[in-house]
Image: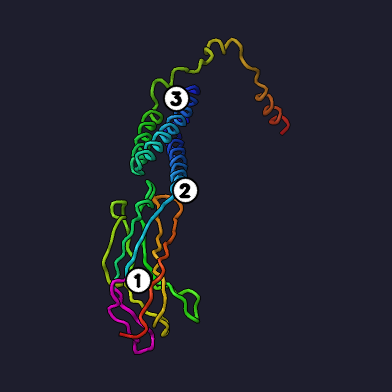
Amino acid sequence: MDWQGQKLAEHLMQLLLACFAVVAFITGYVLGSFQMMILIYAAGVVLTSLLIVPNWPFFNRHSLNWLDPSEAEKHPKPHPAISGPKKNTTKK
Amino acid sequence: MHSFGYRANALLTFAITILALMCAMASVSDNFNSPSPTSQVQVLNINWFQKKPDGDDEVSLTLNISANLESLFTWNTKQVFVFLAAEYETPKNALNQVSLWDGIIPSKEHSKYWIHTTNKYRFIDQGSNLRGKNFNLTLHWHVMPKTGKMFSDKIVMSGFRLPESYR
């Protein structure tokens, strides 16, 4: 799952659970049935988990564009780290 | 949210947090219900009234208890516990409570009832104060909700009097 997908998944999860909770509470209160509230909410949680937990393709539509390897070779990074240990070895 | 396990964990904790919130709201919603229960008790007969060998008074009553407790039930009510207590004053104690009958009402359908019974638990005074005693019969109830706070209240029915002599 890419970065955009993770953000989408989290927001979707919060929105869906909150909506199911509101619907469940109102339905339960109007029908006067606590059991109905729990059943609707449980169904909502199952549905949300089916949508959020698996790594669906639509969470992977913004793949990261890594730099081309050949491009990276043309502009090599300086390696200051290599000279450091060498100096230490000479001092010893 | 990058892995299966993290997403499942986040979903579960958030879902349970919201569930707790819903239960709290259900408990709060009980406060909007203003119950108006009614009850009537008749003492049909005093079966016997005697002094026990150890000196305490004991009475046996036949009671007719009717009550309408339907308004106590809300969507968040699991059951209601009711008990009928005889309450009277003695020189030693300002309030004596003796439970005579109790019952558990499991649902609204059973909450409008009448019952003809002798006292389920023995009506014994601690001493010999019952002759000619005025007493109240009080219907107490405890509402047990599915979630949240328990409520209790009572109806006092006064004007009952025990006979002057043993029989």
The local secondary structure at tag 2 comes to: helix
Real-space Cα distance between discs 2 and 3?
A: 46 Å
- Residue B9 in picture, x, y percent from top left: 44, 38
The local secondary structure at tag 1 comes to: strand
**Residue corresponding to mark 3:** A1
Side of A12 where A31 appears, left or right: left
The span shown in magenta is B43-61
Q: Amino acid at mark 3?
A: Met
Marked residue nearer the N-terminal end (2 or 1): 2
- Tell which of B13 and B129 is nearer to you: B129
The answer for which chain carries disc 1 is B
**Residue corresponding to mark 2:** B31
- Residue B35 in picture, x, y percent from top left: 41, 52
Q: Amino acid at mark 1?
A: Leu
- Residue B104 in picture, x, y percent from top left: 32, 60
Residue ranking furthest to the bottom: B53
Q: Amino acid at mark 2?
A: Asn
The answer for which chain carries disc 2 is B
Q: What is the magenta segment's predominant secondary structure?
A: strand
Same chain letter for marks 2 and 1: yes
**Residue corresponding to mark 1:** B100
Side of A71 where B165 appears, left or right: left
